[in-house]
Amino acid sequence: FIVTSKTGGEKQITERYFTEDKLVLAESENAVMEHLAPYYHDIEVVSIKQSKIKEFANNRASDDEDVYIITLESTFVNEDTGEESTTKYDIGLFAKSIPDATKKAEEYCRQGLADLNLVSVKRTKWIDIIK
């Protein structure tokens, strides 16, 4: 969308949103348009792509939380062959900072039955999740 700056010029603003539980890209585009329509009149969805995020670990508890992506690694041992294999996957979560996101990621890892290792924590540019 486009806003007018303090000097009177126009400035294009790009915001990133994550849409959850949408099966096709058109559903994601419609969800974004419906979500933003009450706030902005001139909206254009310029890009949609499928995310690697498996799930979101929590909900936003306050407006000062950002969206983070944590990468987890799970190691499995094939009982027949004895070979180890690892699988990495991404989880989204809301947190106030990298240390807060790390703490929440460690809590998430302790909840599962599998041995999960935290590989990375990254802050995203996403504004919100649209359900």
Image: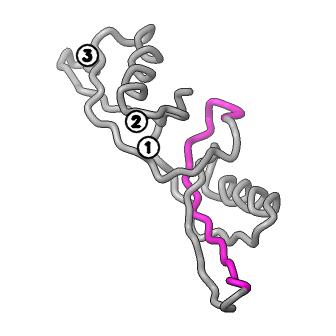
* Quadrant of the image occupied by residue 27: top left
In this image, 8 relative to 129: left or right? left
Asked if residue 70 lies in the magenta stretch, the reply is: yes
The earlier-in-sequence mark between 2 and 3 is 3
Q: Where the N terminus falls, by quadrant? A: top left
* Quadrant of the image occupied by residue 16: top left
Q: Secondary structure at mark 3?
A: strand
- Res. 16 mark: 2
Asked if residue 14 lies in the magenta stretch, the reply is: no
Identify the residue position indicated by label 1 in the image.
Answer: 125
Q: Position of residue 130 (x, y in %)?
A: 52, 28
Q: Position of residue 127 (x, y in %)?
A: 48, 34
Q: Where the C terminus falls, by quadrant? A: top right
Q: Nearer the viewer, residue 113 or 61?
A: 113
* Region of the chain picked out in magenta, as a range: 60-79
Q: Amino acid at mark 1?
A: Lys
Q: Nearer the viewer, mark 1 or mark 3?
A: 1
Identify the residue position indicated by label 3 in the image.
Answer: 4
Q: Nearer the viewer, residue 49 or 80?
A: 80
Residue at x 66% of width, y 54% of height: 101
